[in-house]
Amino acid sequence: MLPQEHNEKKERIINSSIQLFSKKGYDATTVNEIAVASKVTKALIYYYFKSKEDILDYLVQSLLTNAKAITMDFIHVNIVEMINTGNLDILPDRLHFSNEEAIRYFLINAHDFYKSVLDYALKNRATIRILMHESLKGSKHQNALFQLMNFAKSSNDNPIVQTITQADNDFMYSNDMVSFQFFFFIMPLINFVSYYDEYKLLNSLSDEQMQQSYLKSFQIIIDSLVSGKDILLRNKNYST
């Protein structure tokens, strides 16, 4: 079998799994049904994946890997570059910008970054809905969704933390910032893409209207963190 044919068949297995997991649920879907839907043999499925669970693990890791790549692009091109040019100084409780133009530049790029994240999440909303369902029903994959918290954890194995601290070692995530990012940035995004199609249908909205409305809400949230030439990372009245 040619490499291209291998890739095409693996892609069919992955896409069929997503469709079946979304429609029937992970537990109710069998490997035989995946084989029929993807028009391959069960043996070929087991050639690529050790088990049905391995397919779901693959979906989770692919989602996280690509989301991490989008985030790291933003970190390198914006935060690290602004630190290196003297336009941004990271203090323990805030991002301090050299002038108003610098903070405007950062906010524009932050908005573009979040739009990229939104676009990626919408393209993969079937997978996200699967993870949401698994999380709510308390299955063995219930913690898969919480792996997204790794983006905000202040740990040595977090590439985001490593990259920023190499540029400015004052950077750190506080406990309230981790909580804020998860419940006010990550989970709203998860909820939005999970209920996107139903909400759009019920309210007769276009894709553009839906996405612009959501991005405006994001803008309100990030603007609320701005204080002069600073973006606050920690509430000074909150003990971490």
Image (cartoon, rainbow, N blue to C red):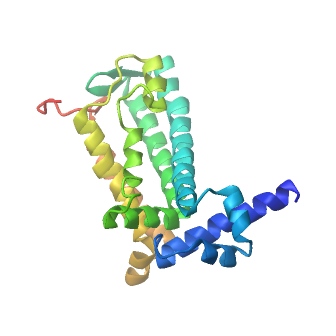
Q: Is residue 9 left or right of residue 133?
A: right
The answer to which of 151 and 212 lies nearer the viewer is: 151
Q: Is residue 3 left or right of residue 125?
A: right
Q: Given the current orientation, which residue lies at the most extreme right position?
A: 2
The answer to which of 40 and 64 lies nearer the viewer is: 40
Examine the rendered structure and indicate whether residue 77 appears above or below residue 198.
above
Determine the residue positioned at 88% across, 57% down.
2
Determine the residue positioned at 18% across, 34% down.
235
Q: Is residue 41 left or right of residue 186?
A: right
The answer to which of 221 and 67 lies nearer the viewer is: 67
Q: Quadrant of the C terminus?
A: top left
Q: Position of residue 182 (x, y in %)?
A: 32, 47
> Which image quadrant is residue 213 in?
bottom left
Q: Position of residue 79 (x, y in %)?
A: 47, 29
Q: Position of residue 17 (x, y in %)?
A: 59, 69
Residue 86 visible to an observer of this rendering: no
Q: Quadrant of the N terminus?
A: bottom right
Residue 66 visible to an observer of this rendering: yes
> Which image quadrant is residue 175 in?
top left
Q: Position of residue 185 (x, y in %)?
A: 35, 50
Examine the rendered structure and indicate whether residue 95 appears above or below residue 213.
above
Determine the residue positioned at 31% across, 30% down.
173
- Count the numbered circles shown: 0
